[in-house]
Amino acid sequence: MSALIPAAIYFGSFLAFALIVKLMVSRWMNLKDIDLSEIRTQLGPNRRKSNRFLLGLWRKEDPD
């Protein structure tokens, strides 16, 4: 039980930091009126397929 408190503080700080960064980026994108689909269209149809490792899962990022 005594290990749960330091673990919660340690991992909680990472989660809080990630949440703050996510909110800041989404707010900035809303201010600039930028959407993720617009960014993908700017890359063009010739972008290559890529496999990404994100949060313990492999994810395929296919061109639209």
Image (cartoon, helix red, strand yellow):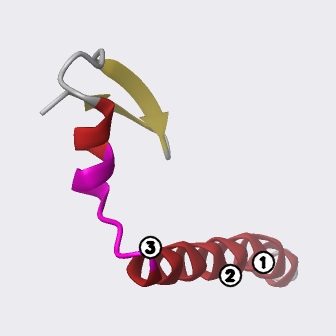
- Residue 16: image tag: 2
Mark 1 and mark 2: Cα distance apart in space: 5 Å
Q: Residues within 10 Å of mark 1 (few under 14, many from 20)?
A: few
The quadrant the C terminus occupies is: top left
Element type at mark 1: helix
Residue type of the residue flagged with mark 2 = Ala
Above or below, 9 against 56 in this view is: below
Q: Give the amino acid at mark 1.
A: Ser
Can you identify the residue that label 1 sits on? Answer: 13
**Does the segment drawn in magenta span residue 53?**
no
Q: CA distance from mark 3 to mark 1?
A: 24 Å
Q: Residue at x 45, y 84 (%)?
A: 31
Q: Relative to residue 44, is residue 22 depicted above or below?
A: below
Which quadrant would residue 9 be assigned to in this image?
bottom right
Residue situated in front as seen by the camera: 48 or 61: 48
Q: Position of residue 36 (x, y in %)?
A: 30, 57
Look at the picture and state if 43 lies above or below 2: above
| Left or right of 46 on screen, residue 19 | right
Q: How many marks?
A: 3
Q: Earlier in the sequence, mark 3 or mark 1?
A: 1
Between disc 3 and disc 1, the foreground one is: 3
Residue nearest the observer in this picture, 63 or 59: 63
Q: Which mark sits nearer the N-terminus, 3 or 2?
A: 2
- Tell me whether the residue at label 1 lies in contact with that at label 2, contact meaning CB atoms closer than 8 angstroms: yes
Question: Mark 2: which secondary structure?
Answer: helix
Does the magenta run of residues contain 38? yes
Magenta region, residue range: 32-39
**Mark 2 Cα within 10 Å, few/some/many (few <14, many 20+)?**
few
Where in the figure is residue 32, as x and y percent of width and height? 44, 75
Contact, CB < 8 Å: mark 3 with mark 2? Answer: no
